[in-house]
Image (cartoon, rainbow, N blue to C red):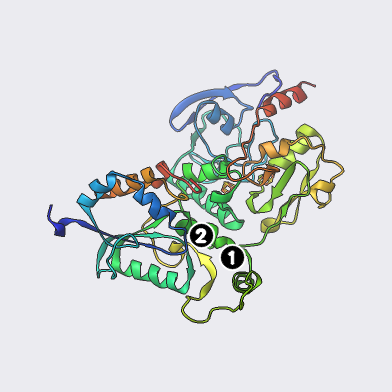
Amino acid sequence: MSESKKITVATTWLDGCSGCHMSLLDIDERLIELAQQVDIVYSPLVDGKHLPETVDVGIIEGSVSNEEDLAKAREFRRHCKYLISLGDCAVTGNVPAMRNLFPLDSVYDRAYQENVQHNPLRPNDGVPALLDVVKPVHAVVPVDLHVPGCPPSADTIWFVLSQLLEGRVPNPNEVTRFGA
Amino acid sequence: MIQTPTPNVRVVTFKIDDRDFSAREDETIIQVAWENGIRVPSLCYLEGLSVWGACRLCVVEIVGSPRLVSSCSTRVAEGMEIRTDSERLQAYRRMILELLFSERNHVCSVCVSNGHCELQNLAQQCGMDHVRVPYRNKVYQVDSSHDLFRVDHNRCVLCSRCIRVCDEIEGAHTWDSKGRGIDTQVITDLNRPWGESDSCTGCGKCVQVCPTGALVQQGTSVGEMHKDRKFLPYLSRMRDAQ
Ligand code: SF4
Ligand code: SF4
């Protein structure tokens, strides 16, 4: 198969633990099968530094918690024809969203002052500002497919990707759930 | 639910999802459905407790009627044609589940009931894979004052099973509710900490019937809370027989 016929895939992680990406790597030898059909053009797992103008499938892990997450989610939506929310953080907000129960000020204080012995100071440069409320990806851009799980198992990810490669719309609820 | 035989109860014939059934006319739609393997979803209905009809997940269509009825509180009748799984019903059930998830704080991945939760299972079963409405992110308390049990209001769906089992089976009526509408909350005694309750016998029935991770045993960590409600049909039969 020539390179140009391959389906292009981009992935990114927002506010998450990167476990969903680890789960993707956990599909083991099926990665070879995947590599024959798809080209991962942009991802924390590969070298490509720029998101191409058009990508067939975008996969987002993690919730939208700061300004950089928001910009990345919007960028992915602009460039990806089909956008997948992978894992509970992307789908529900999950653990990162637990800070929503506290005012943003006390979240900053906790992280940068209360527990810091040396020179406690809130960052005002070089670190993206936190958003008031942590949100799931679909709360900021339209998402085409939601894959719950913390993380979704390797088999779940393989099920979703192989169904898509066969031209079908997978129903992830057949194989996964919140918290799985 | 086990009922003491009443004389002169008629048997009626009706259809559920195009299948023919006959049952006693004092049986409810959900009883007949569940006895025959038709999985109408529900959160508040529990065999052995009184019927509540609050969660609305068990709504079904009756052919010829524009109104949806809750199958836990509607009896079968002669000639009835019942539909349990139309697209309209699926859409309503998904919406109810989304509202439940958005109302309080459910974080399944770190919940003691992860993997053994009726709400979580219903979401999967009913095709609810994300919540379209904004989360409320409202602060709810956890009361760990009881020696044996804990109540995490973040996970409560107000099904009232705890209230009913405590009142109807244990006879203690420790549980009740306060507030109205979205501000309703379950309480112990007159809204005192559970550990200070004079009426709680420590039997744990409420914990076992609670469908979610709201009522749990102390000392349980993520995914460790399994519920066992085998006692319920037995105890309710014994009470009925008295
Ligand atoms: S109570 Fe159930 S639905 Fe809620 S967080 Fe726990 S496992 Fe998830
Ligand atoms: S604590 Fe549990 S049993 Fe009681 S109303 Fe809430 S969800 Fe239902």
Q: Position of residue A131 (x, y in %)?
A: 52, 72
Considering every residue shown, the one lying at the far right of the view is: B198
* Residue A87 visible in the displayed image: yes
Residue shown at the point (53%, 50%) measured from the top left: B109
Label drawn at residue A100 = 1
Q: Residues within 10 Å of mark 1 (few under 14, many from 20)?
A: many
Residue B42 in the image: above or below residue B133:
above
Q: Residues within 10 Å of mark 2 (few under 14, many from 20)?
A: many
Q: How many marks?
A: 2
**Amino acid type indicated by mark 1:** Asn
Residue B15 in the image: above or below residue A113:
above
Asked whether B51 or A98 is in front, the reply is: A98
Asked whether A3 or B35 is in front, the reply is: A3
Q: Position of residue B44 (x, y in %)?
A: 63, 41
Q: Are marks 1 and 2 in contact (CB under 8 Å)?
A: yes
Q: Chain of mark 2?
A: A
